Image (tube, grey):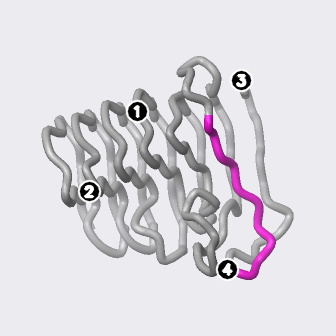
């Protein structure tokens, strides 16, 4: 998909419970150029994992995939942007906020390495702002702002060799 200029993707349902009917967006393309979003808005995506529902259906997910999202907004969903076993993903100048599910973060990486997060604003999420987990290694986080999240602004768990430069994180 190559979505550019003022794209709005919104679920018709705001019910993000496990039994809800909220939509989700999942990228499975391994070619970096195959998923490129600029100036998109993603609203009310995802629902709570459970009853066999994979976490990839919790919002805007990259699953063993590559691509980029820039100058976009992800808001009011169960989770923000999720990278599962993905590499070479670029997230830049995005706003991820008001994601209210019991999911770790506005931007969540699990088993995902060699990604670049640059100049993103991540705030007002129910748990963390940016969360790296489960061997998410060799990622670069530069000039991101993470604030007013319920827990830490940036959290790194079971991951190593990540580079953090000039990020702002506060409660």
Instruction: Let me know if residue 24 is in the magenta part.
Output: yes
Label 1 and label 4: CA atoms lie apart by 28 Å
- Location of mark 1 (residue): 87
In the rendering, at what x and y percent does residue 126 appear? 45, 74
Closer to the N terminus: mark 1 or mark 4?
4
**Segment tinted magenta in the rendering:** 17-28
- Location of mark 2 (residue): 154
Up-down relation of residue 45 to residue 171 (above or below): above
Up-down relation of residue 10 to residue 16 (above or below): above
Residue at 37% in and 53% down: 110
- Location of mark 3 (residue): 2
* Predominant SS of the magenta segment: loop
Few, some or many residues within 10 Å of mark 2 (<14, 14–19, 20+): many
In the rendering, at what x and y percent does residue 170 appear? 24, 61
Label 3 and label 1: CA atoms lie apart by 18 Å
Up-down relation of residue 141 to residue 34 (above or below): below
- Location of mark 4 (residue): 18
Query: Which is in the foreground here, disc 4 or disc 2?
Result: 4
Closer to the N terminus: mark 3 or mark 1?
3
Closer to the N terminus: mark 3 or mark 2?
3
């Amino acid at each position: 998909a190559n979505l550019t200029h003022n794209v709005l993707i919104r679920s018709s349902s705001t019910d993000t419970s496990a039994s809800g009917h909220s939509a989700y967006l999942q990228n499975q393309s391994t070619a970096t150029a195959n998923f490129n979003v600029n100036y998109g808005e993603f609203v009310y995506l995802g629902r709570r994992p459970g009853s066999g529902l994979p976490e990839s259906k919790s919002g805007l997910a990259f699953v063993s995939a590559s691509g980029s999202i820039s100058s976009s907004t992800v808001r009011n969903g169960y989770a923000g942007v999720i990278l599962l076993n993905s590499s070479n993903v670029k997230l830049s100048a995005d706003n991820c906020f008001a994601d209210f599910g019991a999911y770790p973060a506005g931007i969540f990486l699990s088993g995902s390495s060699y990604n670049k997060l640059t100049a993103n604003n991540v705030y007002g999420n129910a748990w963390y702002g940016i969360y790296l987990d489960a061997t998410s290694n060799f990622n670069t986080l530069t000039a991101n702002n993470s604030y007013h999240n319920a827990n830490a602004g940036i959290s790194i768990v079971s991951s190593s060799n990540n580079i953090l430069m000039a990020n702002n994180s506060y409660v």
